[in-house]
Image (spheres, rainbow, N blue to C red):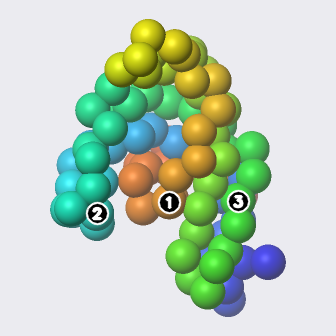
Amino acid sequence: MMKAGVTDPTGSLVRFSTEKRQLYFPTSSTYGLFDGEVGLVISSTDNHGDIHVRVRWLKPVLQTNGSYAEISDFNLLNFVVVSSAHE
């Protein structure tokens, strides 16, 4: 259940932003290979206002180990919402 005033992002189209990641998580890796990648939020959880999303990428994202990520989990603060499912 989402905190009051926060819309559930499930079903929204989002774009990963290394700029937002650096802003909100300055001591963490920027995950530069994800920058600009677009995906669909397939689920989300709200842990006391800290919203995490599971994203299915529209195009699998190449990882540093040579494999591809089809689904990833990140804090919602790492993303720009391209299109909200609830607008």
Asked whether disc 3 touches disc 1, contact meaning CB atoms under 8 Å apart, the reply is no
Q: Residue furthest front?
A: 65
Answer left or right for 80 relative to 67: left
Q: Which residue lies furthest to the right in this view?
A: 1
Quarter occupied by the N terminus: bottom right
Image location of residue 28, percent across then percent down: 27, 56
Name the element at disc 1: strand
Q: Which residue is drawn at 32% across and 38% down?
A: 31
Q: Residues within 10 Å of mark 3 (few under 14, many from 20)?
A: many
Q: Residues within 10 Å of mark 2 (few under 14, many from 20)?
A: some
Give amino acid for label 1: Asn
Q: Which mark is residue 75?
A: 1
- Mark-to-mark CA distance, 1 and 2: 10 Å
Residue that carries the numbered disc 3 in the rendered image: 44
Q: Quadrant of residue 18?
A: top left
Name the element at disc 2: loop
Asked whether disc 2 touches disc 3, contact meaning CB atoms under 8 Å apart, the reply is no
Image location of residue 40, percent across then percent down: 65, 37
Q: Residue at x 52, y 52 (%)?
A: 74
Residue that carries the numbered disc 2 in the rendered image: 25
Q: Residue at x 27, y 32 (%)?
A: 32
Q: Quadrant of residue 59?
A: top right
Asked whether disc 1 touches disc 2, contact meaning CB atoms under 8 Å apart, the reply is yes
Give amino acid for label 2: Phe
Answer left or right for 23 relative to 42: left
Q: Is residue 5 something that shows in the picture?
A: no
Figure check: 34 above or below 6: above
Give amino acid for label 3: Ser
Quarter occupied by the C terminus: bottom right
- Mark-to-mark CA distance, 3 and 1: 9 Å
Reading the chain from its start, which is encountered first: label 1 or label 2?
A: 2
